[in-house]
C-alpha cells in the first residue's frame, strides 16, 4: 500500500493554489484526505467564504466514501436523486455531489486519498485538484 505523505499532500495544495492564482480564479479552499478519510493537509486562501473549507472537505470525503470522483456523483444525482439524497444523509462528514472532489490513485489504481477543492466554479475546482494530484506524481480521478 502506498501511503499519502504530508509532503505529497502539501505539494498538491501548493500546486493547486499556484494554478488557481495563475488563472485568476476566486480564493480557494483545498483539503487533502488520506485513504481513511483523515485530514492530511488543508489550506484556505484569504477572503474565502466561511464554510468553504467544509465544502472542500465534504467533496473529498464524499468521493472517498462513494469510491468515485464527485463529477460522477453529480451525474448520479441527476439520474437517481433519491439515492444521492440518502447517501448524503448517511455521510456523516458530508457529501457534495458536484465536481471538485478528486480521488488520488496510484499508477496501479489504488485509492490512497482524495482532494476536495471549493471556491470557483465546480469545473475549475476540479481542475485545481487534478493539477495538484498530478504534480505530486499520482493519478487523478474526478469521476
Image (cartoon, helix red, strand yellow):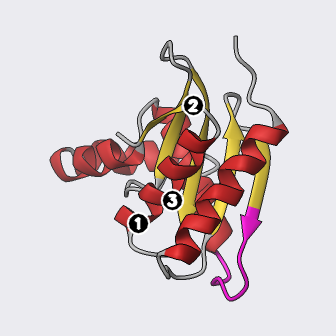
Name the residue at 48% across, 17% down. Answer: 109
Left or right placement of residue 46 versus residue 107 in this view = right
Name the residue at 46% across, 63% down. Answer: 125
For the residue pair 127 and 135, the one nearer the viewer reads as 135
Name the residue at 56% across, 21% down. Answer: 106
- Label 2 belongs to which residue? 138
**Contact, CB < 8 Å: mark 3 with mark 1?**
yes
- Residue 90 seen from this side: no
Asked if residue 113 lies in the magenta stretch, the reply is: no
Disc 2 from disc 3: Cα separation: 14 Å
Element class at badge 1? helix
Q: Which mark is residue 124?
A: 1
Q: Quadrant of the C terminus?
A: top left
Asked if residue 48 lies in the magenta stretch, the reply is: yes
Name the residue at 57% across, 53% down. Answer: 116
For the residue pair 8 and 114, the one nearer the viewer reads as 8
Amino acid at each position: 500500500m502506498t501511503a499519502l505523505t504530508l509532503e505529497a499532500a502539501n505539494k498538491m495544495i501548493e500546486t493547486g493554489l499556484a494554478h488557481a492564482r495563475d488563472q485568476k480564479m476566486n480564493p480557494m479552499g483545498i483539503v487533502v484526505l488520506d485513504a481513511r478519510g483523515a485530514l492530511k493537509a488543508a489550506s484556505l486562501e484569504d477572503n474565502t467564504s466561511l464554510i468553504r473549507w467544509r465544502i472542500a472537505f465534504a467533496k473529498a470525503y464524499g468521493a472517498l466514501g462513494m469510491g468515485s470522483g464527485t463529477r460522477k456523483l453529480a451525474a448520479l444525482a441527476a439520474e437517481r436523486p433519491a439515492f444521492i439524497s440518502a447517501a448524503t444523509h448517511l455521510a456523516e462528514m458530508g457529501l457534495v455531489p458536484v465536481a471538485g472532489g478528486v480521488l488520488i490513485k496510484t499508477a496501479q489504481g489504488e485509492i490512497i486519498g482524495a482532494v476536495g477543492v471549493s471556491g470557483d466554479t465546480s469545473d475549475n475546482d476540479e481542475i485545481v485538484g487534478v493539477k495538484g494530484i498530478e504534480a505530486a506524481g499520482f493519478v487523478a480521478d474526478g469521476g
